[in-house]
Amino acid sequence: MNNLMTTDNREIFFNVQEKELYSPDGDYAHDKKMLVREDTGSYMSVVNRKYRTVLNEEVLFPLQKQMVNHFDPVVLEDIQIKDHISKDGSVCFAEYILPKMKQTVETETGHKTDVGLRYILKNTFDGSSSVVFYGGVIDFFCTNGMIAGQYDVTRKRHTKNFSVDGFVHAFDDTIKRHHTIVEQYQRWADTRIWDSKKVIDLYRTLTKGTADEPKRTNGLSDRLYAQYLDEIQERGKNIFSVVSALTHYSSHDDERFKLTKRGDDVTLLKREEQVSTWLNSKVFADYLQAA
């Protein structure tokens, strides 16, 4: 059992020092400061002096206390905690999975999958992102994770007015919405797919590259469709399978969706952010409307 009130020895709870910044000529940078990871001495970034450094523990400790206060101890006895740290700590994700908070989704093929509750906290120390709290679900049949939707994402900028209160309220809201999210999964499972070409077109539209970055999505739509063909063998021809192909892409480093040499768990979580954007897009909404 992970005791949420005694997990302060995790690597993710490192301290960050703010240091004055000088040019090579010795000139003082009035509007900048340097962030350094205290336990390793690693340089993290140079940020604006008004940038509010938010330590991971500042958000995670209140959230963990909220979990302890809300859930029965039986629910928390097998909680899974996964920390993902990249770029010497400049990018951090803390993931909490609650297997006992599960509900079942069943397709017309008779396939059943348990869908559990999941939280992710993202924090950065390089100015690349706000502090972000995600509520979501995880498909225990194939360990596909999913950031549930736009209503389950809370962002707070690194400013002097930063407060953890919004994340605590977001936690409460996600608990209330969990059943609604699973009901949405079931509706997707109940919606049959009749036109495979529309699935191909959907993937191509969602993943189209830009003129600046054409290679990053090159062939991705074809690989997503190949994954969809695998999904329907178990789940049947329905929108749940369409979505499962996307969430497989965001959750797996395999031959079809292999990470680059520089890729890691954080890359997968960034894929998940991308998939969440796709599933909350007008393109996907229009597809659902026409299904």
Image (cartoon, rainbow, N blue to C red):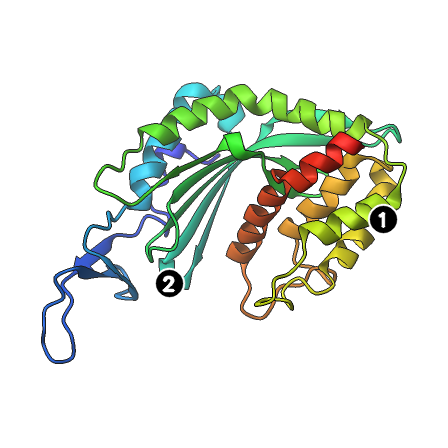
Residue at 19 percent across and 57 percent down: it is: 18
Which type of secondary structure does the marked residue at label 1 adopt? helix
Nearer-the-camera pick, 149 or 133: 149
Q: Where, by quadrant of the figure, is residue 131 drawn?
A: top left
In the rendered view, tell whether residue 174 sits above or below residue 245.
Answer: above
Residue sticking out furthest to the bottom? 25
Q: Which mark is residue 88?
A: 2
Q: Where, by quadrant of the figure, is residue 148 drawn?
A: top right
Q: Position of residue 162 (x, y in %)?
A: 27, 38
Q: Position of residue 220 (x, y in %)?
A: 72, 59
Query: In what quadrant of the picture does the C terminus appear?
Result: top right
Nearer-the-camera pick, 208 or 152: 208
Residue sticking out furthest to the front? 211
> Is 236 left or right of 166, judged from the image as shown?
right
In the rendered view, tell whether residue 88 sits above or below residue 62.
Answer: below
Q: Which mark is residue 229?
A: 1
Residue at 55 percent across and 47 percent down: it is: 273
Which type of secondary structure does the marked residue at label 2 adopt? helix
Q: Residues within 10 Å of mark 1 (few under 14, many from 20)?
A: some
- Disc 2 marks which amino acid? Asp
Nearer-the-camera pick, 74 or 277: 277
Q: Position of residue 23 (x, y in %)?
A: 15, 75
Q: Position of residue 21 (x, y in %)?
A: 16, 67
